Image: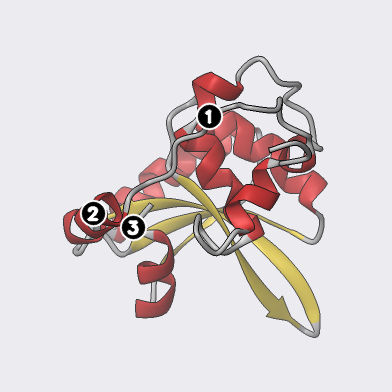
Amino acid sequence: RKGDTLASIAGRSEVYGDRLKWAILYRMNREALGSLPQGENLPDLELPEGMQLRALSEEEMKRNLQRRASSLWVVNALSAVTQGEVVPAVISLVKHDYPVYITTAKVNDKDWMRLRVGFFKTRAEADEEGKKIMELLRFKDSWTTKLGASEFSDFARY
């Protein structure tokens, strides 16, 4: 619809119910969105009216959860306080076929966005992929973490 953006579509309750899941929508529609400017404002860039985007069906999400049931490790590629810091890394990782997502955390009363790449069966596998991701992004640091049930169920389905 006129005025739609990746973030506004992802935020709809009938889509993903969370504006930060724009990164998942972008990953699902990378080729269709390739002609758009790939800058820091990508999540809030007005999409062409009538553009058709693909979102996962409930059945696809259920299959993804089952397929990833033993893959609880993720790489935290970046923690940032602004979307502008996160967007270029999302674009780069998606272009390299990484399954990325953005989650939030409050640390010392400050809201952070965490760009994560998943889902790995072992910590060693996540650590190894984390090194490749850091090299790709030209970042110095990442860490791996094992997901809790809540974050796993919220993001592994995509």
**SS category of the residue bearing label 1:** loop
Residue type at numbered disc 1: Gln
Residue at the spot x=51%, y=58% of the render? 16
What is the quadrant of residue 62 in the picture?
A: bottom left
Q: In the image, which is nearer the foreground, mark 1 or mark 3?
A: 1
Q: Mark 3 points at which residue?
A: 157
**SS category of the residue bearing label 3:** loop
Residue at the spot x=71%, y=35% of the render? 88
Residue that lies at the very extreme toward the top in this rendered image: 35
Q: Mark 2 points at which residue?
A: 59
Q: Mark 1 points at which residue?
A: 52
Q: Earlier in the sequence, mark 1 or mark 3?
A: 1
Would residue 88 be found to the left or right of residue 30 on screen? Answer: right
Residue type at numbered disc 2: Glu
Q: Quadrant of the N terminus?
A: top right
Residue 109 x/y as whole percent = 80, 85
Q: Work out whether 37 lies above or below 71.
A: above
What is the quadrant of residue 55 in the picture?
A: top left
Residue 12 x/y as whole percent = 60, 59
Residue type at numbered disc 3: Arg
Residue 64 x/y as whole percent = 25, 53
Residue at the spot x=55%, y=64% of the render? 13
Count of labels in the image: 3
